[in-house]
Image (cartoon, rainbow, N blue to C red):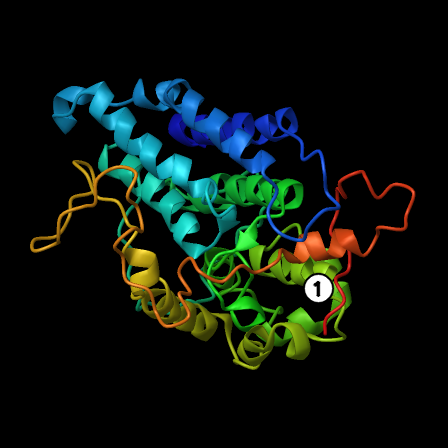
Amino acid sequence: MSPVVITLVDLLSKIKRKIDQFPASDISSSRFGKAEFRDFYDNIEQEMSGLLEPIVSLIDFNRVKLTPKEVTIELKAYLVESWGNRTRIDYGSGHELNFMMFLFAIKRLGLLNVDEHDYNSDLSADTRKPFKLDDENQNDHTDATSLVLKVFVSYLGTMRAIQYMYWLEPAGSHGVWGLDDYHFLPFLFGSSQLACHKYLKPISIHNADYLDMYADKYLYFGCIKFINQVKTASSLRWHSPMLDDISGVKTWGKVNQGMIKMYMAEVLGKLPVMQHFMFGKIINAPLGLSQALPNGQDGENHVHYFWAECCGIKIPSAIAASANEHKGHENFKKMPSTPQPLPFD
């Protein structure tokens, strides 16, 4: 791994350790988000400039024509918003997008070596070999593979810990009809990771033995196993019908192409997500964009759909509902460290 990738993984490890400093004291009162998340969020926001210092120190400021303060302010904005919304105590694909923009900003600052790839190439080509999450000897000459399998996977692990501790609500109102209550990109990256696998097929996600064997090696299988652990319906058809439909696609390459199109349409193409997107001197706003709202007015004048699905409907956390199923247990007051089955009705 390159020095900047190692630094990013270390940064995420430091943020993950902060979760234990702000434990949720009451996990029995509600299925909705826990107020202690705001303490965690405030601490991250307060200390973020110091946490970013190792990354900022790697930048050649003669080349980027920005000051360390300007860079820190913009990187901080993306990374702080990567953990969820402080007011609503929720998390969704827009927050996940902020983390990707944090990485994209670092790339634009010249710290990451990520080549342009031909996405129209045959993803199932026999010349490619799938990288595994536990592969320490990745032969990619760029940072691209490590950014997904090391940095993004570290971010995903930190978000899972936050979701378990603070019961973040799913942002929006898609619920079980989306790919995941919280995430989209693990499925996009995961299908790409498997695109050249000779034996595992999309239909393989229905095999419980395969899920146990490969959850720690392949992102897609790990996400399916996570969903199955927190929801107790007998099959994906009941609790995740879209993922069930996708499993009928013949190849991972086709799944990946569909994921990219879906991400463009359902995340980057949706006003409830993109109206919160932040531009600055690193990631410039396109010409013709309206002026940003003053600080403290986020969302005050933005457009709501009829159901106000961007920030209106409160949806209980599946993890919270699962924990509430264990109220009668002696150890209920202890936060579950692993997913517990969630009855689906």
Image location of residue 254, percent across then percent down: 44, 75
Image location of residue 280, percent across then percent down: 19, 39
Q: Give the left or right position of residue 281, taking residue 337 as reference.
A: left
Residue that appears at 63% across and 47% down: 167
Q: Quadrant of residue 105?
A: top left
Residue that appears at 66% across and 62% down: 227
Residue type at tag 1: Asn
In the rendered image of this protein, does residue 36 appear above or below residue 253? above
Judging depth in this view, the residue of 255 and 331 nearest the camera is: 331
Judging depth in this view, the residue of 34 and 78 nearest the camera is: 34
What kind of element bears circle 1? Answer: helix
Residue 268 visible within the image = no
Q: Give the left or right position of residue 345, taking residue 136 as reference.
A: right
Image location of residue 212, percent across then percent down: 75, 58
The residue to which callout 1 is attached is 228
Q: Quadrant of residue 317?
A: bottom right
- Residue at far right of view: 330
Judging depth in this view, the residue of 139 and 232 nearest the camera is: 232
- Please state, as top left, top right, bottom left or bottom right, where the N terminus lies in the image: top left
Residue 290 visible within the image = yes
Image location of residue 102, percent across then percent down: 34, 39
Q: Give the left or right position of residue 137, taking residue 212 as reference.
A: left
Residue that appears at 36% across and 21% down: 49
